[in-house]
Image: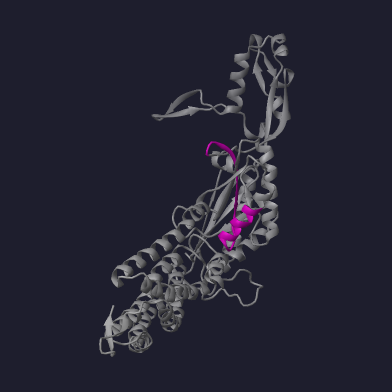
Amino acid sequence: VMIVPMYMFSPSELAPVEDQGFMFGIINSAANATADQKSHYGRAVEQVFLSQPERELTFQLLFSPSEPFSAAQGVGGFSGMVVKPWNQRERSMREINLDVQAKMAAIPGLQVFAGMPPALPGGSNFPIEFVITSTDDPVNMLQYAEQLQLKAMESGIYYFPPEIDLKYDQPESEIIIDYDKVAALGLNNAQVGADLSASLGGNYVNRFNIDGRAYKVIPQISRSQRLTPEQLGEIYVTGPQNQLVPLNTFATIENKTVPRTLNRFQQLNSIKLSGMTAQLDAGLQILEDAAQEILPPGYNIDYTGESRQLRTEGGKFLPALGLAVLMIFLVLAVQFNSFREPFVILLGSVPLAMFGALVFTVLKLPNPDMPYWTDGWTTTMNIYAQVGLVTLVGLIAKNGILIVEFANVMQEHGKDKLTAIKEASLTRFRPVLMTSVATIAGHFPLTLVEGPGAAARNSIGLVLVGGMAIGTIFTLFVVPSLYMLIARQHHVETRDSTGEVAHAVS
């Protein structure tokens, strides 16, 4: 019975975070950040990476303010470092990441998300990617997203406030033309549009050749002359008789703030919250519970990236495990020609082995300040642990098969049930022990692995070693007890015509 709550309370994730000796930082910039500002913050981030004693090399990529990706997503650039091999450093990547994140948070005016790449290919920058979808106006959706962001931070398990991809911080100047004044001044609408496009749009109008090479002619006002709305008002357009008319004589400039991008998910308006936590499943559960309380009717939740894989694929483990147990049960039923013996074998071994394996997942550190929980010799409920649990079902069932099969043979040779199970337990003790010790010894090195890929190997090793060790100990006592209660009586006593007891084998 305990394995049900133990499984439910075990921290879950798609795959354990691996120490790959590499980390990166996403530099977020303001929507109107200049190249000089990005360069300044880039140098500050670089100094943080250079201050780490474990670094081996650093890299950085800064985007131009005119880069479409940078302007839309607010990403000023990427920076990161490759650290020394495991045997040349004392700190893990997790410890280094926390130190880097703390130092970057102390830089005024800078927002950088430091993290490690996902363990499995195809993941995104953030493990948690929670999506709100609706047909409602994005402005209203943003209010609910900010409430979810606040709930996430109040939980205390997020490294930083979840990033909201909808940002109303893009300054925009709209030129509103008074067409009555345009007509009064004798201006041509097409000419006004062409002049403004040439001055501000950056479109090329022709090509010219130098030394056999063709170059585009791109007329555009220099950056220093179009920094403010007042400077835009001094742009000249061609009027009657080629006279130059300033823009502010027939147009006004209205300043407003617009979103950088309006995203859609499955043809609906969407807002995505991206964040990092130590436990992926717990972080998603907090947002799901908060969404159930906050979001009104007509709003739905969805996932992308690693979060989507966890929610869609993680729910398939229990059906797969149930199918594995059912297949073993049916095969044993054919072998023993009975449903009782397979039930004794599986009930007396599988739950106990599962209990032994889940001990190492439920004790995974949920909070550094909580007693009796540890971060060593434990693992999360991930795809590697799930593979280990399915494998464990087949391995531990062999112990029960050895005992039950021999007890049936003893009964067929005239022994009563109690004597048969006693002799079977004693006789099969050594084979059971040898099988279990061989399995444990074969997988125990996985629990001691260090270096790249260690987390995945540790996960499957702890599940198999813990499950086999604890499961074997209890199987030697539980299977004989269940055999006495449930198994068939293969030896039946009858009396012949003389009144003497005759033995019949069923």
Quarter of the image for residue 222 reads top right
Q: Position of residue 51 (x, y in %)?
A: 59, 65
Can you say whether 39 is above or below 330 in the image?
above
Q: Is residue 42 magenta?
A: no
Tell me where the magenta segment starts and ends, as one range.
Answer: 266-289
Of residue 333 and residue 284, the one placed in the foreground of this image is 333
Q: Where does residue 160 sit, x and y in percent of width and height? A: 65, 57
- Please name whichever residue, 326 or 25, is drawn nearer the observer in this view of the structure: 326
Front residue of this view, candidates 179 and 300: 300
Question: Is residue 275 part of the magenta span, yes or no?
Answer: yes
Q: Residue 5, image x and y in percent? A: 56, 68
Query: Residue 389, image x and y in percent?
Result: 43, 68
The answer to whether residue 248 is seen in the rendering is yes
Whether residue 449 is visible to the viewer of this picture, yes or no, is no
Is residue 215 positioned above or below 78 on the image? Answer: above
Extreme-front residue of the structure: 497
Instruction: Say how many tags the image has.
Output: 0
